[in-house]
Structures are given as C-alpha cells and as structure tokens.
Image: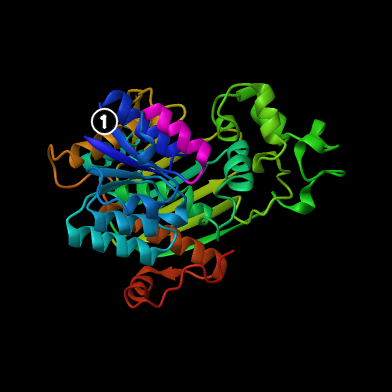
Amino acid sequence: MELALIGAGNRGMTYASYAFEKKGVRIAAVVEPDSGRRERAARRFGIPTERCFASAEAFFGEGRLCEAAIVASLDRDHYGEVMAALDAGYDLLLEKPISPDPAECLAIQEKAQALGRKITVCHVLRYTNFFSRIKEIIDSGTLGKLVSIDHSENIGNFHMAHSFVRGNWRNSLLSSPIIMQKSCHDCDLLVWFAKSPARAVSSFGSLTYFKRENAPEGAGGRCLECAAAANCRYDARKAYLPVAGQWPAEVVCPTDSPEELLEALKTSPYGRCVYKCDNDVCDHQVTVVEFENGVTATFHLSAFTNRNHRRIHIMCENGEIYGDDEDNLLEISRFSSNQAAEYDRTQIVPARVGSGHGGGDTGLVDDFLRLAEGSGGEESRSSIGLSVESHLIAYAAERSRVEGRTIEMKELRRMLREGKENQGEKQA
C-alpha cells in the first residue's frame, strides 16, 4: 500500500513513520511548505524529488498518486486539502480538528459520504487501553446506566507555554480555539461514553496568566536577551535544553545538539517571552454539557498543572469509576447501603503500550490502514461520522464562553444547515 503525507510536522511524521517502519507502507509523496521538514521526510521515507511538493495545489495537480493520504497540516488548511483529496479519490487519515469551522466539518462529512470515501479522524484516545476499558465497563451495564461524567484535561504549564502561547495553536484566528484544537479529543470521549448527541452546552474561561501585565519586571521580548530569565521558569533555556532531541525541543531544533538548539532559539518563535506573544486562547476553561439522553458532563481544561494528564470520574446508577491516565489506574466501586458498610472496590491497571498517547497512535493507524486496504469493516472507531459531534460541542463551548450564554444545540444545528452560523465571528 502507498500513502501520501500532507503536512510533515510532528503528528504527521509520527503516523507516517509507524506505517512505513512497522506496517510496510510506502510513503509515495510528501506535501510540506517548510523546506527543512519536506527534505527530512523525503530522506526518511526515500521519496523521490519529483514527489516532494511545497503546496497542496501542486500535489493535487498531479492526479491521484496513491490509495490514501494522511492530512496533518495546520488546522485552517484542512478543509481545502480534504475536499480536494476527496475529489481526487483518496481515503484519509485526518488530524484533529477536522476544521475549526463546524459548517466545514459537516461539509466534509457529507462529501465523504456522497463519494463513498473513508475518513478516520485522529481521535487517538478512543484507541487507548485506558479509555477503551472505561468504555467497556460503561457499556457492560454492570454499574447500571451512566448518569454523569466529570472529566479534566491537565495540559501542563510547560505544554501550554510551548504549544498554545509560543506555538502554532496560540491564536484562535490563526488556528482554532484551544477547546477545539486541544480538547476536541475530550469532547469526543464524552460523546463516546454518553452515546448521545448534546442538547445544550455552557462554558466559562479566559486567558488569565500568559499576558503582558504578568511579565516579570525587566522582562525582554526574547529569553536569550532577558534580564529576568534567571528567575523565570518559562525561560526557553530551561524549557528546551534539558530535553534537546526530544519533544518539545525537537520542534525547535531537530537535532540533540545544545549549541544548535540555542542558535535556533535566537530567532525561533519558541524563544519568545511567554508574556509578550500574540496568543489569545484560554489558559483555563470549564464546560458543562447536557446530552439528549439526560447524561450530564463537566469538562475542565487547565494550564495550571505540573503534569500533562487526564483524570475522569464516571458516575453510574449503581457504582462509579475513577481514573488517571498517567497513573494508568482505574478504580471501580459499587455503592454500599451506608457509610459504615464495606463496599466492593476493584482496581484495574490497563495494559500499557509503548507508542504515543498510551498506544492510541498505533491503534489509530492500524484501524485506518485496515479500512484503507479493504481488509474488513465499514467504519473506523473514529470515523468522520462519529467525530463531528465532538467538534460541534467544542464550537458551542467557545460560543458560550465568548457570548456569555447557553448554546442550544438543536438551534445551532439548524443554523449550520441553513448556512447562518458564521465561524470566527466574535472569537476571542
């Protein structure tokens, strides 16, 4: 089988590398505007020069070059590239978000269905043993019906600074709001567990800390020239030098050379002061969702944590589940008759898998390749049809946060169908 890689950043290279190295897939072409990334992909996968493209337009101008493609470009490039790829006859592995615009998400879904093309969205958490085990317990009914979910994504202060203050996803108009870009994963988990569309969404949050008024006295525009750097935990040297050659330093400089990394930080966006960037996305946000089947959920994303992990509390009629994906531990309890009584409590440690996102990356690619090769099944675990609802919830949450009102999902869907909902309007 042959794949094209559209977007040779970290995520695209992760998926393509696994397919190439472990599954025997040939990477037939690469589309990447950054010449350094394009050349690295060409070397790694042995792609000939004539199959290396600086633009999607040039790539699609060559006609259909292989069976399927990975689309892992920047958020706001997805729509045009995906629609062209569907017209060209490609099945797709599509990095989330599908699009920051919910109308574009629906248009992609409709076109894929009309043309009979398969799109697997990179909601990798559905493929982890940790969250799959939670899903199995809920669906088994052993704890009764699901009633409510309390879920949190602890982004980690260093991850926030790297990706959402200095990095590609810092500005909602350039990429997408943080709840869409980072946490459509989590909205997708809520939909997956609840097994229902959302009825109403309400959300609150803001950019509280990563802004100019919180800069240390004497702070400069760039860390390597800053008089306050020695006492600042966000000094780029502290953030990147100890992890040279690893994520996130490899985003700044692809080698593990401290000298080359320091040189890159002189001009890289990642060498900027976190208090003086052009970021506008929230650093904390709380969202409440009521589903049509009566299940309720709360979701909390926050940069103000020391670790990057997710915690979840599932509440059912006859018992509950607590989980922390970093500790890889689930605790299942059945309710007792009173506070003094013994109660049934079980701990489960899901099998660990060595790949990224707790095995989610490899599980996702395996599922995609199975469908693209026609080796069984009509739909992936994270197909476009199953994935759009999470994006509608994320969009509604941002609308609610900005406009200060609860979003009724029936009305939002109606406006989207009628073309009256305008993405970007009033975005923070």
Q: Look at the image and say whether residue 42 sits in the magenta stretch.
A: yes
Please tell me which residue lies in front, 417 or 195. 417
Q: x, y percentage for residue 158?
A: 62, 36
Question: Is there any visible trace of residue 340 in the rendered image?
Answer: no
Q: Look at the image and say whether residue 303 sits in the magenta stretch.
A: no
Q: Does 254 sit left or right of 327 as displayed?
A: right
Q: Does 397 sit left or right of 352 as displayed?
A: right
Q: Main secondary structure of the magenta part?
A: helix
Image quadrant where one finds the N terminus: top left
Give the residue type at disc 1.
Answer: Val
Where does the magenta region start and end? 33-45
Q: x, y percentage for residue 323?
A: 41, 34
Mark 1 falls on what kind of element? loop
Kindly identify which residue carries mark 1: 25
Please tell me which residue lies in front, 325 or 97. 97
Image quadrant where one finds the C terminus: bottom right
- Identity of the residue drawn at 33% across and 75% down: 414
Q: x, y percentage for residue 381?
A: 25, 43
Q: Does 265 sit left or right of 219 as displayed?
A: left
Question: Which quadrant of the view contains residue 44?
Answer: top left
Question: Which quadrant of the view contains residue 87?
Answer: bottom left
Question: Which quadrant of the view contains residue 41?
Answer: top left
Please tell me which residue lies in front, 165 or 349. 165
Q: x, y percentage for residue 310?
A: 47, 38
Question: Is there any visible trace of residue 73 in the rendered image?
Answer: yes
Query: Vertical placement of 404 versus 290: above or below?
Result: below
- Identity of the residue drawn at 65% across and 43% down: 269
Query: Vertical placement of 109 versus 157: above or below?
Result: below
- Identity of the residue drawn at 65% across and 40% down: 270
